[in-house]
């Protein structure tokens, strides 16, 4: 009896049962196809979008942070800082783990003084706006990723002594007609002369520095009575954003950390997962509903098929089929229908992801296991949907069944 | 085994059990009042018998067929199929006996409309334990026996009634059953096709197959060696 209704026979009979009604098969799998396709599209687009974000992942944006005093609105509507940063803010922040470079910057109020390369007072010359004058600490250039084009950047010594030296942003240098520093050219702020010791470029986070005349903090305090730094720029390690955001305010204002406002990049992974979460919740829910309907559809049609094939069931029982042979046949039929739906749905889903990506010029990214899993998931749904009809088929009494035809 | 202990090759000493033996079998359908479809009946069908059971409709013919075919269980009494008691065996064992020992031929043919003639015959080999390697060969032989070798890949719907019933007979005999149970085998056939099927039964009988044919048609029952009449649930042997 070893050759009695083996797995091969089971699958052959089940496939013959499906094969007999191709039109119905199409309608049966439709729900599963839509459900599986929407799941694949959802996951695929989320993965593609996440890949897109990762591709645009900007190393500069991810490693740059800034601290500034919290501001408050005054009665006349202007913004005012509630508290100032300490002058040694760069040193305090620089000691923190994850901070690679720190530098202070502040706008210097030069009053009516103009910035010129030559101290000529020509009443007939048209009024021109002067480049801004900013004050910075020695670490600023490194903190904002600036590069020295020629000459050098000022150091802590210049700062301490209040030396009258400046560095120029490339565009400011162009405007002031300074192209080389080996001859120690000077620029005049009002009537004070400052030696230009370098020209700087880069500074993607503070491009206004390109148009500015930058002097050491100490010099600005001495010559223009600069009160407090405005911003603390930090270059941080990748992924250190959350940590820096938590620790820097405490380092700068241990008693009132809330007066320090931090701008830090969020963790790289949380950007992607936020986007993914947005898409996924809605579409996965829709996919789930479609799958549920798909499963019910299969269950319904399989049940209908059992009712129609009562005669066939009776005949098989008369030919020696056990109840479990009948039950497994209908289970396999249902699972196969589900699997077909899963495979068609997964294929359609992949096609949709590719089409959307092509339209958006994205790189489609889709985990192969998601596709295979989705197709297999259709089979599981079919299997579950087949349980009740199969039990129904197994309970058919052969005598009653044989009264009708096949 | 030694020379001193010869194998008992004496068939007339060994009791060959009858293929079908009913011992006081009754079938009562519960109800108010209960319906006695079959009163206590005894019936013995020996190997090689060709028995017909005749009776008007409502006489209990179908009940008897269902009992003989193990499709129904007797209310009381014992039914021995091929010497094996069947009253207390499991449903699975009954299925196995149906597949291996009994071949059915129905009035309505009961062929699967979407499967070819060959597939329909092969269906009976699936559940009866015919070795896979032999199935096709035996199905072809069975179809040859009913003279339908030229219709192997036809669908039943394209065949005549007589041809369909011959396919059903091929399906019934392909698993080499001990007994062939036919329920009104000519009920849906015209005279010519009926004659063809009855001729086939004669051939099968001549080959040694045990046949039990249930019919209300006296022409059909006249072909059998033994006739049993059933009326109001009681069996009487017609001489």
Image (cartoon, rainbow, N blue to C red):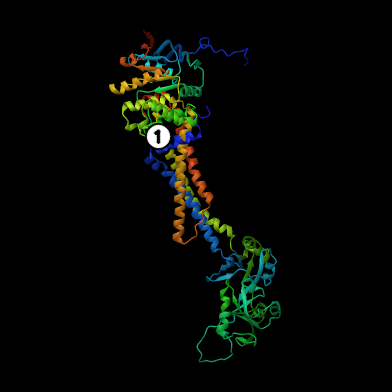
Q: Given the current orientation, which residue lies at the most extreme front position?
A: B3
Subunit of label 1 = A
Does residue A328 appear to the left or right of B61 in the view shown?
right
Q: Quadrant of the C terminus of chain B?
A: top left
Determine the residue positioned at 48% across, 50% down.
A40
* Res. A268 visible in picture: yes
Does residue A24 appear to the left or right of B85 in the view shown?
left
Determine the residue positioned at 51% across, 47% down.
A372
Tell me residue A141's x, y (percent). Answer: 63, 74
Q: Quadrant of the N terminus of chain B?
A: top right
Instruction: Please name the residue that numbered disc 1 is placed on.
Output: A305
Q: Secondary structure at mark 1?
A: helix
The total of numbered circles placed on residues is 1
Tell me residue A30's x, y (percent). Answer: 41, 44
Is residue A230 shown above or below A317? below
Tell me residue B204's x, y (percent). Answer: 39, 20
Mark 1 neighbour density, 10 Å: few (under 14) some (14–19) many (20 or more): some
Tell me residue B208's x, y (percent). Answer: 43, 18
Res. A147 image quadrant: bottom right
* Res. A256 visible in picture: no
Residue A386 or residue A314, whichever sits in front: A314
Does residue A53 appear to the left or right of B195 in the view shown?
right
Is residue B86 shown above or below A266? above
Is residue A159 shown above or below A67? below
Residue B13 or residue A76, whichever sits in front: B13
Determine the residue positioned at 40% across, 38% down.
A19
């Amino acid at each position: 009896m070893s050759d009695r209704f083996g797995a091969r026979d089971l699958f052959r009979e089940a496939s013959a049962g499906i094969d007999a009604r191709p039109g119905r098969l199409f309608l049966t799998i439709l729900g599963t196809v839509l459900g599986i396709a929407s799941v694949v599209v959802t996951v695929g687009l989320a993965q593609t979008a996440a890949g897109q974000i990762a591709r645009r992942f900007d190393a500069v944006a991810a490693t740059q942070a800034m601290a500034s005093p919290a501001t408050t609105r005054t009665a006349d509507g202007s913004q005012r800082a509630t508290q100032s940063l300490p002058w040694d803010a760069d040193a305090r922040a620089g000691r923190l783990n994850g901070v690679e470079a720190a530098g202070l910057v502040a706008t210097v109020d030069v009053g009516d003084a103009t910035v010129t390369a030559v101290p000529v007072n020509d009443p007939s010359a048209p009024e021109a706006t002067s480049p801004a004058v900013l004050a910075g600490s020695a670490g600023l250039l490194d903190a904002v990723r600036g590069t020295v084009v020629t000459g050098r950047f000022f150091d802590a010594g210049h700062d301490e002594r209040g030396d009258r030296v400046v560095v120029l942003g490339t565009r400011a240098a162009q405007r002031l007609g300074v192209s080389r520093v080996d001859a120690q050219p000077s620029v005049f702020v009002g009537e004070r002369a400052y030696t230009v010791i370098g020209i700087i470029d880069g500074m993607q986070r503070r491009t206004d520095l390109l148009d500015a005349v930058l002097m050491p903090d100490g010099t600005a305090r001495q010559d223009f009575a600069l009160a407090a730094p405005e911003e603390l720029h930090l270059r941080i390690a990748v992924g250190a954003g959350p940590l820096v955001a938590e620790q820097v305010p405490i380092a700068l204002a241990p008693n009132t950390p809330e007066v320090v406002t931090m701008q830090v990049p969020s963790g790289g992974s949380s950007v992607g997962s936020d986007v993914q979460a947005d898409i996924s919740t809605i579409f996965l829910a829709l996919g789930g509903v479609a799958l549920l309907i798909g499963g019910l559809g299969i269950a319904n049609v399989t049940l209908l098929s059992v009712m129609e094939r009562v005669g066939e069931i009776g005949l098989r029982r008369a030919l020696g089929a056990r109840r479990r042979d009948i039950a497994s046949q209908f289970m396999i039929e249902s699972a196969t229908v589900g699997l077909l739906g899963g495979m068609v749905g997964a294929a359609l889903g992949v096609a949709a992801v590719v089409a959307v990506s092509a339209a958006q010029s994205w790189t489609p990214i889709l985990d192969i296991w998601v596709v295979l899993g989705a197709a297999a998931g259709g089979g599981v749904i079919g299997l579950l949907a087949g349980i009740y009809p199969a039990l129904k088929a197994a309970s058919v009494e052969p005598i009653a069944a044989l009264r009708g035809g096949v | 085994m030694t020379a001193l202990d010869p194998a008992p090759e004496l068939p007339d000493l060994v009791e060959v059990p009858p293929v079908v033996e009913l011992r006081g079998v009754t079938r009562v359908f519960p109800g108010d009042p209960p319906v006695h479809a079959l009163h206590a009946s005894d019936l013995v069908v020996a190997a090689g018998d060709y028995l017909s059971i005749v009776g008007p409709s409502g006489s209990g013919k179908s009940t008897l067929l269902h009992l003989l075919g193990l499709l129904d269980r007797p209310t009381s009494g014992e039914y021995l199929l091929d010497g094996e008691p069947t009253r207390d065996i499991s449903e699975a064992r009954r299925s196995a006996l149906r597949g291996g020992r009994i071949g059915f031929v129905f009035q309505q043919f009961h062929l699967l409309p979407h499967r070819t003639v060959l597939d329909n015959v092969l269906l009976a080999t699936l559940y009866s334990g015919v070795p896979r390697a032999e199935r096709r060969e035996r199905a072809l032989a069975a179809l040859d026996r009913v003279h339908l070798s030229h219709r192997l890949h036809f669908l039943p719907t394209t065949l005549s009634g007589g041809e369909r019933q011959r396919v059903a007979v091929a399906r019934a005999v392909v698993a080499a059953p001990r007994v062939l149970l036919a329920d009104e085998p000519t009920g849906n056939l015209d005279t010519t096709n009926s004659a063809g099927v009855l001729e086939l039964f004669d051939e099968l009988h001549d080959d040694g197959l045990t046949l039990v044919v249930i019919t209300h048609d006296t022409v059909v029952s006249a072909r059998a060696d033994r006739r049993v009449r059933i009326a109001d649930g009681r069996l009487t042997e017609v001489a």
